[in-house]
Image (spheres, rainbow, N blue to C red):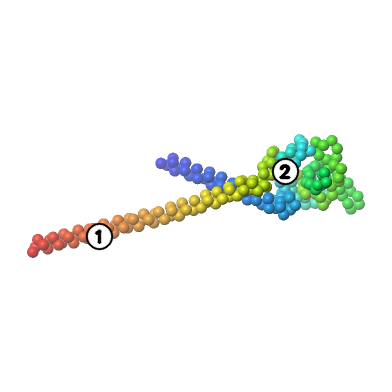
Amino acid sequence: MEHNHIAKKAFTFILNAAAWIILIFALLVTILVFTSDRNNGVPNLLGYIPLTVESDSMKPAFSKNDLIISRDIDDIKDLNEGDVITFWTIIDGKRVKNTHRIIKVNEHDWNISYVTKGDNNPTEDTIEVYPGDIIGQWTGVKISRFGSAMRFLRTKTGFFICILIPMALFFLFELYKFIVVIVEIRRPAANVLDEEEIKRRAIEEYLAQQKNKENEDDSVKE
């Protein structure tokens, strides 16, 4: 019996932990999706920017469909040659995000710009990067192939399947636990009431027996 009780507690603990992990993950993705929508497609969580790599231009540092983490830059002058930055640029006539390495810093009087290049590209980028174009600096953190998952989560289907449904299941699970607690709290009270009812009936039966006995004794005397 004790072994079963311990196993039940362990199973409940695992369920609780899994439910909270799912909820926290769902909330984080929700925050990233909303901040991305309100920030020109750039998600930001407390200064950190998770981005999906769109090409193999930076191999072997990271590859297409990897998830990389950049961060906000406090002082643009802290950037040096060799740093990897994420920035806005124009590719095929479209304004897109790109993440390449700084190979040269140009300073002209009060102006500063950066020449960038993909590690896997044979030539440097044709458009210089200016401070206003920079989104963040790569922290060196990457999660291989996880960018595809993040891209799917940002779709309506992915958000519904992976975020809304798990959150609904979490709240249903918490509601079930709440109901179980209420039942457990009420059960002892019900047991006490049952015991009181049994005692009351026993006393009534005893008194009835005593009364019947007195009546029988009176009958015998007469």
Determine the residue positioned at 63% across, 50% down.
27
Judged left or right of residue 114, residue 38 is left
Residue 126 position in % (x across, y down): 87, 43
The quarter of the picture where residue 65 lies is: top right
Answer few, some or many: residues within 10 Å of disc 1's Cα (few below 14, many 20 plus, some between 14 and 19): few
Amino acid found under the numbered disc labelled 1: Glu
Farthest residue in the right direction? 109
| Image position of 159 with respect to 122: above or below | below
Answer few, some or many: residues within 10 Å of disc 2's Cα (few below 14, many 20 plus, some between 14 and 19): many
Q: Which structural element holds mark 2?
A: strand
Determine the residue positioned at 15% across, 62% down.
215
Amino acid found under the numbered disc labelled 2: Thr
Residue 25: tell me if it is visible. no
Q: Quadrant of the N terminus?
A: top left
Q: Quadrant of the C terminus?
A: bottom left
Is 171 or 83 nearer to us in this picture? 171
| Image position of 155 with respect to 201: above or below | above
Judged left or right of residue 190, residue 123 is right
Residue 95: tell me if it is visible. yes
**Residue picked out by circle 1:** 204
Determine the residue positioned at 82% across, 44% down.
91
The numbered mark at residue 38 is none
Residue 94 position in % (x across, y down): 81, 47
Residue 58 position in % (x across, y down): 78, 38
Observer-side mark, 1 or 2, equals 2
Judged left or right of residue 220, residue 211 is right
**Residue picked out by circle 2:** 52
| Image position of 149 with respect to 216: above or below | above
Judged left or right of residue 187, residue 95 is right
